[in-house]
Amino acid sequence: MRIEVLAGLTWPWPASTLHWAYLTSGLLIAAHYAPLLRRAWRHPEATATAQSLLTWAVWTLCRVVAFIYGLFILHDLVFLIVVGADLIGRLAMAALIVRARWLTRRHARGQASRDAVAAE
């Protein structure tokens, strides 16, 4: 799809500078999932309470669409690397939210069982 209003815009430096800037910024964003993922792993109770699985699922689904678009329409390796790295981070976070909710529910069921036994 071509946008005629933008057709006259040009990048004043070699296109490779923009490719490298985009790749670097995208990988920088993806690398910054690490602290979030580490906290989600270490503090499942907080993760289960504070993180919205629906929000992360929607964000992840949007990245899947972007990746498919890049693969079949753009054919742009730099775009695929950036979106793919971001997608991996989002999938990992969604998985950790599911894990956190499972652990929290398991802990709550175990506590309820212990309370019932103690009440007898």
Image: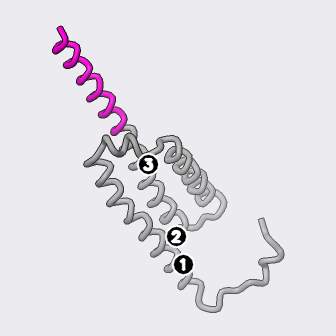
Query: Is most of the magenta stretch helix, strand or loop?
Result: helix
Residue that carries the numbered disc 1 in the rendered image: 19
The label shown at residue 30 is none
- The amino acid type of the residue labelled 3 equals Leu
Q: Secondary structure at mark 3?
A: helix
Q: Is residue 40 magenta?
A: no
> Counting residues from the N terminus, which is met first, the one under dot 3 or under dot 2?
2
Give percent across and percent down for residue 72: 63, 56
Quadrant occupied by the N terminus: bottom right
**x, y (%) of residue 57?**
51, 44
* Pointer 1 local density, CA inside 10 Å: few below 14, some 14–19, many at least 20: some
Left or right position of 100 against 119: right
What is the three-letter code of the residue carrying label 2? Val
- Residue that badge 3 annotates: 91
The span shown in magenta is 99-120
Decide whether residue 112 is among the magenta residues. yes
Would you say the residues marked 1 and 3 are in contact, meaning their CB atoms lie under 8 Å apart? Answer: no
Reading the image, the residue beneath label 2 is 78
Q: Please, which residue is most extreme toward the right here?
A: 4
Q: Are marks 2 and 1 in contact (CB under 8 Å)?
A: yes
